[in-house]
Image: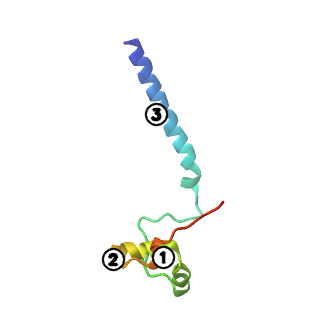
Amino acid sequence: MGQDRINEKRMQDLVLSEQDRRRKRFQAHNNNTVWKKRAQPPADWNKPLPDWLENKYKDTYLYHKSKEMKLGEDNKSPQADRTLCVIS
């Protein structure tokens, strides 16, 4: 009986501690008045990228992977099967 009460008290203390930690962590975010908080994304959130950005993006790994996923396995780009060696 006594051990259960101690464990329950410790659990409640832990929950309160985590709630307090989270409240402190988000305090600056919630008090920020520089940015206006949105209720929903902008209407044009998924519009096409500008041409200059599309051209910059064209030869990246993510571009080729995205294209491969959209078109399926049959239409793999030649870049898809290359291997990369990174030395850091």
Q: Residues within 10 Å of mark 1 (few under 14, many from 20)?
A: few
Residue found 36% across the figure and 75% down from its top: 70
Q: Which amino acid does label 3 sit on?
A: Val
Residue found 41% across the figure and 15% down from its top: 3
Instruction: Report helix, strand or loop for mark 1.
Output: helix
Instruction: Report helix, strand or loop for mark 2.
Output: helix
Position in image of residue 25 (x %, y %): 56, 46
Residue tagged 3:
15
Residue tagged 1:
79
Instruction: Give the quadrant of residue 21.
Output: top right
Image quadrant in which the C terminus is located: bottom right
Which numbered disc, 1 or 3, marks the residue that appears first in the sequence?
A: 3
Which numbered disc, 2 or 1, marks the residue that appears first in the sequence?
A: 2
| Residue sitting at the far top | 2
Confirm whether residue 69 shows in the render: yes
Left or right of residue 21, residue 1 in this image: left
Residue found 43% across the figure and 78% down from its top: 77
